[in-house]
Amino acid sequence: MGSSRVRVQIVDALNRPVGSARRCDMRRLQMWHRAVYIFVVDQHDRLCVQHRTPWKDIFPGYRDLCAGGVVDAGESMACAARRELQEELGLLLALNYCLKLHFEDGMNAFGSVFLARYHDQPMTLQPSEVAGIEWLTLSEALAVEDATPDSRRALKALVDQGFWP
């Protein structure tokens, strides 16, 4: 089943589950949903930044300051974070839950933010979503002009609330 056909968890404006919908319908109708953001940091406190493929459904060709994605129907935030990290980067890392975010203005998402420590494990990039990666310092990552707006906001919140390593 293509990713646009996957059923995702739909919530109301208070983040209470109300059902599921196909990802493509959720995007088209700007439905409230849940998302996860996983910031992968190496032993030098550099951030793994992804280059999105040019065929991504939103923000094609941009850079993502984190791994992450939409929560599938019936899936917990922690399970979604583990799944997304494994799908996008081929990594199984310990996740540290940090904070929640709320996105409006058409994104209509409730996000959970996680940190994960990377120690030179082999990576396998998901060809349909990740064109490449680079390792950036925090200041370099915050200066990326073509970063997805939600990943930029999630990183700023992580730093502002004292969760940055």
Image: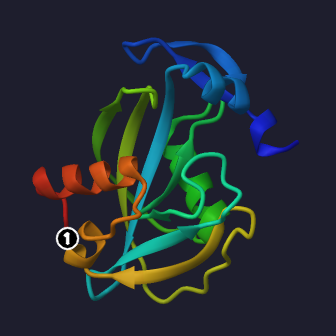
- Along the line of sight, the residue nearer the viewer: 107 or 145: 145
Relative to residue 137, is residue 128 depicted above or below?
A: above
| Residue with the mark numbered 1 | 165
The amino acid at mark 1 is Pro
Rendering quarter of residue 135: bottom left
Relative to residue 148, is residue 27 depicted above or below?
A: above
Identify the residue at horizontal 38%, vertical 27% (top origin): 105
Mark 1 nearby-residue class (10 Å; few <14, some 14–19, many ≥20): few
Rendering quarter of residue 99: top left
Query: Could you tell me residue 103's position as x and y percent?
Result: 35, 32
Relative to residue 45, is residue 82 depicted above or below?
A: above
Identify the residue at horizontal 45%, vertical 31% (top origin): 107
Outermost residue toward the right in this view: 1
- Along the line of sight, the residue nearer the viewer: 75 or 66: 66
Query: Could you tell me residue 149's position as x and y percent?
Result: 37, 49
Quarter that holds the C terminus: bottom left
Relative horizontal placement of residue 91, taking residue 103 as reference (left or right): right
Identify the residue at horizontal 66%, vertical 63% (top origin): 54
Secondary element at tag 1:
loop
Count of number-bearing discs: 1
Relative horizontal placement of residue 92, taking residue 39 as reference (left or right): right
Query: Could you tell me residue 96's position as x and y percent?
Result: 34, 57
Quarter that holds the N terminus: top right
Rendering quarter of residue 89: bottom right
